[in-house]
Structures are given as C-alpha cells and as structure tokens.
Amino acid sequence: MSVAPTLVPEAAARRLWDVAVVGAGPAGAMAARELARRGAGVLLIDKARFPRYKVCGGCLNPRAVRVLGKAGLGDLVGRLGAVPLTRLRLAARGAFADISLPPGAGVSREGLDTALVGEAVKAGAAFLPGTTATLLAATGTGDRRGLRLRQGRQEHGIEAKVVLAANGLASRLDEHAHEPEEAAVARPWEPDSRVGAGVMIERPAPGYEPRTIYMACAAEGYVGQTVVEDGRVDMAAALDPAAVKRAGGVGELAEAILERAGFPSYSGLASLPWKGTPHLTRQAPTLGGDRLFVLGDAAGYIEPFTGEGMAWAFAGASLVAPLALKAVTRGWDPELLVRWRGAYHRKVTRRQIICRITADLLRRPVGTGVMVRVMSVAPWLARPLFRIMYRD
C-alpha cells in the first residue's frame, strides 16, 4: 500500500492554505485528517515518500487505540491486521516477569503511517511527499505564515493561515529560529539522553511467543520487540551512546543486552540494517509561535516503554485540531497558543513523567533486577503503573 501525492509544489504555491502540516507521522497525519474533516484546506507535507520505515516499537497501547476509536478510526487497527498485544515479558540479569496488559496492538509504522495519511487524503487533505519545508520569518502584522518547499532542485513558496510542525525528533523547521519563541523546532536534547535504534526482522527466533511485548533491560539501555501485522518482528532499542561506541555498534549492543537478559538470540542480529534516531529525551522550551503549533515528537519526547509515543502523538493531534481551526475561522489570537500549552501539559506532559521515572529506574541495574524479581512473583504490582499510563 502506498499514498501518491495529490498535487505538485507548483500547484500548492498557487493558493492560500488554511493549514500547512509539516510531518506526516501519527501526529501530523491525524491532525491533518481532523482539520480536513472540519472543512479546512489542509496541505500535508513530508520529506519522505510512503510507505517508509521509522524506528519505533510498533506498539499501540490501549489509550492510543481508544483515541483512534474516538476519531472514527476504530476499525483501522483491524483493517491493518494488527496483532493483539496482551502481555509484557520483562527481563533483566536473568530474571523474568510476565505482566498481563489491557489489549493493545502491534503494527508497523509503514502500515500505520501510510494508512493514516490515506485517511487524511480521504478526508480532503492534499498530500505532498518527498518535499522538505522551511518556515519563513513571521511578518508581525501578516495574516499568514510562509514556508519554502524544496523538492529536488525546485523551490516554491507557499502560505498558510496556520502551520503545524509535526516533523519529529530531528525537527529543524526554521533555519535560523527567526523568533525566540520558535526555538522549539530546534531544541537541544538532554545531556543523559539515549539514542534510539530499530530494525525489522523477518520472523521471530524460536522461543518467542505471539501477542507479547518482550523487553530486555540493562544499564546500557533496553531492547524491546513485538510481532507486527505481517509476521515480522519490530525490534527497537533505547541505548546509551557511549555504550554503543564501546560495543562496536547498535546491533552489537542490542545483541549483548538480549543475551544478558536471558532472551533467545537472533542469528546475525548485529549485521542487520539497523536504523538510528537522534537523542531521544528532549523537551521543547515552548510549543509554538506566531501562527505556529508544535506537536508530536517535535514538541518534546521521553523514552517510551510500551507504546506511549503514539498515544502522545494521537492525543496531541486531537487537542490541537480545534485550536488550529479557530485560528483559521476567527483569526490568530496568541491566547490560542496559551490554551495549547495548557492542554498539552495536562494530557501529554504529565503522562510523560511516568515514562521518565520508569526510564530512570531502568538505568539502575541493581534496582531493575530487584524490580523484575519482585514482579515475577507479584505481577499485580505493575497494575497501578499501567492504569495511570493508559487512562484517558
């Protein structure tokens, strides 16, 4: 399945858009769909062509599934053939804990993101893949924001009443951070941040069971894996950069972490085509600027554990859409940005605190080993944590 462009840059430059969305991942595609459904003229832009691979654990947790349902996409997971996920197997230092989970879903980002873009197009959004976007300086008195689009050697300028920056961890939408409050799209990572890495494996190694998230934990990071809709294994890791260097590469370190945790090994894991991400943990100093909302991973990110990343993305998209629509229909008001910050903090940032605490705990090998051993005999102790993480 693929999604073709619905127009060319020259055509995009001929009209004033209500909303330009930069980044067609879960946050951007969902926001584009919600706005298009409400009648806005939406241009969805992405530097990649779809389908494309993204480093991700491939887990939709129950909260993410519920948000899809509330948006009228409750059948999307089933249509994609996603694998039900009902168990977490946690391992550290040879100890194992099996924890029952409320039903989630295992799905590849190739499948999910392509389907969400397709839904945005179906709702009326225009789609322009294979195109990079640069935010131009705000004029101060204008009623629109400009973007410079580049596709190959061609460049074109477009204008929109509102811009949504949903262009991911490596977000650098504006070349020079034209406005101080817009430094959010070029923010630094935290000093002790880990890097992400991922790879797709053709089939599970013997010893791995379906419907289960496997998580191997060590001082140098953690490696998670689950089976997705086409039977492949989506393996993703959060790793200490210095440890990656010492091990000789992300694949080598992932292999060592799995082995020390006591999970079955994969033959040739280190030689597979691993992909990396920038440093994971980073927090934007603000969430937008003049006619600009920042959302998704571009708004800040904490190392996720069992599918929180996509839940945060969907939640942000559902929150920003009505505010962006008000900016389109009633004109820009700085109060909209204040409301966006407040809503995002309540529904996303507070949830990320739980992941930060969990990630900090997983950096302590002795504490992690003790935690896993305790949960191996009392798995119910994890229930309050997951109730907090998965509630609306």
Image (spheres, rainbow, N blue to C red):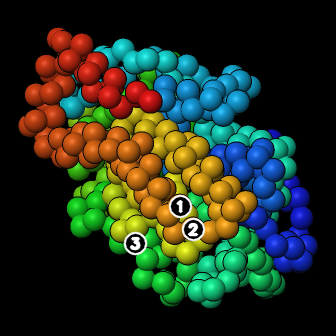
Under circle 3, the secondary element is loop
For the image, the number of numbered tags is 3
Determine the image quadrant of residue 285.
bottom left
Residue 249, can we see it?
no
Instruction: Tell which residue pokes out farthest to the front in this image.
Output: 330
State the CA–CA distance, disc 3 to disc 2. Answer: 24 Å
What x and y, as percent, mark residue 313? Answer: 52, 46
Q: Which residue is mark 1?
A: 336
User: In the rendered view, does 102 fall on the left or right side of 113?
Assistant: left
What x and y, as percent, mark residue 380? Answer: 24, 13
Could you tell me if the residues under marks 2 and 1 are in contact, i.e. CB atoms within 8 Å?
yes
- Give the residue drawn at x 26%, y 21%: 384
Q: Residues within 10 Å of mark 2 (few under 14, many from 20)?
A: few
Q: Amino acid at mark 1?
A: Leu
Q: Residues within 10 Å of mark 1 (few under 14, many from 20)?
A: some
User: In the rendered view, does 185 fall on the left or right side of 292?
Assistant: left
Image: 41 above or below 291: above
State the CA–CA distance, disc 3 to disc 1. Answer: 22 Å
State the CA–CA distance, disc 2 to disc 1. Answer: 6 Å
Q: Amino acid at mark 2?
A: Asp
Q: Which residue is mark 2?
A: 333
3 or 1: tag closer to the N-terminus: 3
Image: 179 above or below 192: below
Under circle 1, the secondary element is helix
In terms of depth relative to the viewer, which is nearer, 182 or 257? 182
Q: Residues within 10 Å of mark 3 (few under 14, many from 20)?
A: many
Determine the image quadrant of residue 331.
bottom right
Q: Amino acid at mark 3?
A: Arg
Q: Which residue is mark 3?
A: 187
Determine the image quadrant of residue 180.
bottom left
What x and y, as percent, mark residue 359? Answer: 25, 44
